Image: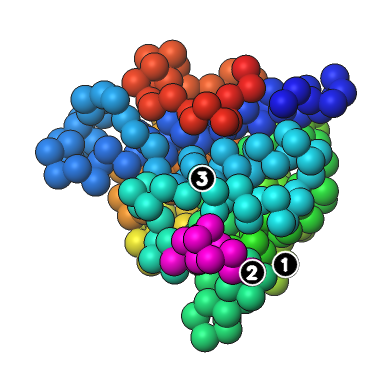
Amino acid sequence: MNPATPAEGERLSRAMAALRGLAVGDALGSQFFVPGNHSALQEGTLPPAPWAWTDDTEMACSVVAVLATHGGVDQDALARSFAEHHDFDRGYGPAVNRMLRLIRQEGADWRELAAGLFDGQGSWGNGAAMRVAPLGAWYAGEPELAARQAELSALTTHHHHEAVAGAVAVAATAAIAVGPDCPADAGRLLGAVLDLVPPSAVHAGVRRAVDMLDYDDVATVAAVLGCGRRTSAQDTVPFALWSAARHLGDYERAFWTTARAGGDVDTTCAIVGGIVASRPGGEPSRTWTDRTEALPEWARWS
Ligand SMILES: [Mg+2]
């Protein structure tokens, strides 16, 4: 499974850098749900290894695999990959667990299932946003294309417009952050993202995040923006983008700031880790990468 062209090879290596950063954020972040590790979080010390990743990484592997084999988001291939690789023990939400099991075991149609969740509103969970930073890295410097492809990727599981807006916002941030025209100013970066996010609570939240970029008190910011306690896109993405935009180029600070807010820590840290690591020099340290569970064999290209 090699990239078709040198350009696709470059896309893939950027997406893999983002995927590795996403996996470290997810895996290390999830360690802080273990009660014995709470003091390590406050002290900024590393919990015992190995750190196992969760559903965020498993689904992100499928996103990258489909980009690598199809050159874009083929929705049927993506839904199939999610279902084939679905591991019940990786911490999926109950609705997605059931949906992926039905697709895998009973050949159910992902379109019907995704559209039918939550009485036909679709899920507004943060699951479409948590897996999509590598897609943004794939479309570096092409944020409009990243936004459109992120929407396609979201709809395979999350039909609600907030979930789609969350995925668009994360992918656009990564595409701009890793592209050649990334603004040095965090407010201008998120302003460019806002131009691509449809009207939504996610949009309103990211706008509020821009207003709070000069706040240093993460607890206050998380209290206003949310940090994933309700596991919705609108309660997760604005805070994650606030943290990523403030810490581009510094993976460790990005991680600790994000994790200390609490909430859906594996997912906020997966989003932030994926965005920050997509930029050259933004990768997690070797120490952190070595302590993180290896990516599955079917998602290793370099
Ligand atoms: Mg998770």
Give 67 or 38, whichever is nearer the viewer.
67
Does residue 298 appear in this view? yes
Residue, disc 1: 198
Residue 52 % position (x, y)? 34, 34
Residue at (63, 66) in percent of width and height: 110
Image point (53%, 58%), residue name: 104
Mark before the other along the chain sequence, 2 or 1: 2
Q: Which residue is mark 3?
A: 85
Give how far across and how far down residue 216 sits, in percent. 41, 43
**What is the spatial separation of the Cα atoms under label 1 and label 3, in whole angstroms?**
31 Å
Secondary element at tag 3 = loop
Residue at the spot 25% in from the left edge and 41% down from the top edge: 32
Asked if residue 99 lies in the magenta stretch, the reply is yes
**Camera-side residue of 87 and 53:** 87
143 or 245, which lies in front? 143
Q: Which mark is first along the chain, 3 or 1?
A: 3
SS under mark 2: loop
The residue beneath circle 2 is: 109
Which region shows up in magenta? Answer: 98-109
Query: Which quadrant does the N terminus fall into?
Result: top right
Say left or right for 189 vs 231. Answer: right
What secondary structure characterizes most of the magenta part?
helix
Q: Is residue 123 magenta?
A: no
Q: What x and y, as percent, mark residue 127?
A: 51, 57
Calculate the distance from the C-alpha at mark 2 to the C-alpha at mark 1: 27 Å
Q: Amino acid at mark 3?
A: His
76 lies above or below 99:
above
